[in-house]
Amino acid sequence: QLQLQESGPRLVRPSETLSLTCRVSGDSISDSDFSWGWIRQPPGKGLEWIGSFYYSGSTQYSPSLKSRVTISVDTSQNHFSLNLSSVTAADTAVYYCARRFDNTDYIVWGQGTLVTVSS
Amino acid sequence: DIVLTQSPDSLAVSLGERATINCKSSQTFLSDSNNKNFLTWYQQKPGQPPKLLIYWASARASGVPYRFSGSGSGTDFTLTISSLQAEDVAIYYCQQYWTFGQGTKLEI
């Protein structure tokens, strides 16, 4: 059974880089039937796609975040990571890693981790 | 880019009554494998990730109560809760690919 687990610092200083890792168990990131990605949800607000990738294809980023975001993949560890640079308080959110299945289009979610940007 | 617009933004329904939430997409997306519409519905409660309710516009996910149903095709879709229960109070989202509607808050 697929499990996605986010990990990383819960508190980040303004102007620094937010870094999170999603550890995947029960499936392989290199499976071509799935895409993988990051979604965030600011407190009390809706869901915002950050970026996503197919292992064999390119990575796509939200236009509003593209200049600050990098998603990287480590297939040997079966995990993928998010780096978001130059953070501000507006980047405070619950960050979810997720998998989308091409056939059904639905998304399986990690439990999410709240990251607070504050000095 | 895909744009998903949900209506209404919030909704108050009496216990036992019907709740209806709409989702309009800027584009039509069909599964390559079976030509079914891509439109997924989730339920989110505080402190939890979204929970899958409906996929392929009308297929109920495993374990989802029968009072939840999805309908629609093309660019217009509906989530219906036939008889509202107290535990259905939540925010509901529609999704296509990695795009989400803005959410609909359902209250008693």
Image (cartoon, coloured by chain):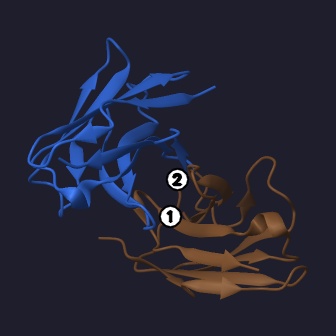
Chain colours: A blue, B brown
User: What is the crowding at mark 2: few (fewer than 14 residues within 10 Å), some, or many (at least 20)?
Assistant: many
Q: Nearer the viewer, residue A48 or A100?
A: A48
Q: Secondary structure at mark 2?
A: loop
Instruction: Indicate left or right for B19 with A31 as reference.
Output: right
Res. A114 image quadrant: top left
Instruction: Indicate left or right for B18 with A24 as reference.
Output: right
Q: Secondary structure at mark 1?
A: strand
User: What is the crowding at mark 1: few (fewer than 14 residues within 10 Å), some, or many (at least 20)?
Assistant: many
Q: Is residue A77 above or below residue A108?
A: above
**Mark 2–mark 1 distance (CA, rounded to whole Å):** 9 Å
Q: Is residue A70 above or below residue B80?
A: above
Residue B72 can be seen in this image: no
The kind of residue tagged 1 is Gln
Q: Chain of mark 1?
A: B
Q: Position of residue A118 (x, y in %)?
A: 22, 49
Residue with the mark numbered 1:
B95
Task: Tell me if label 2 and label 1 are in contact, CB under 8 Å.
Answer: yes
Q: Residue at x 53, y 57 (%)?
A: B31
Q: Residue furthest front?
A: A119
Q: Residue at x 57, y 77 (%)?
A: B104
Q: Nearer the viewer, mark 2 or mark 1?
A: 1
Q: Residue at x 14, y 54 (%)?
A: A66
Q: Position of residue A21 (x, y in %)?
A: 33, 29
Q: Nearer the viewer, residue A71 or A102?
A: A71
Q: Residue at x 33, y 44 (%)?
A: A115
Instruction: Indicate left or right for B12 with A115 as reference.
Output: right
Q: Chain of mark 2?
A: A
- Image quarter of the N terminus of chain B: bottom left
Q: Position of residue A27 (x, y in %)?
A: 51, 23
Q: Is residue A82 above or below residue B102?
A: above
Question: Which label number is shown at residue A105?
Answer: 2
Callouts 2 and 1 in the same chain = no
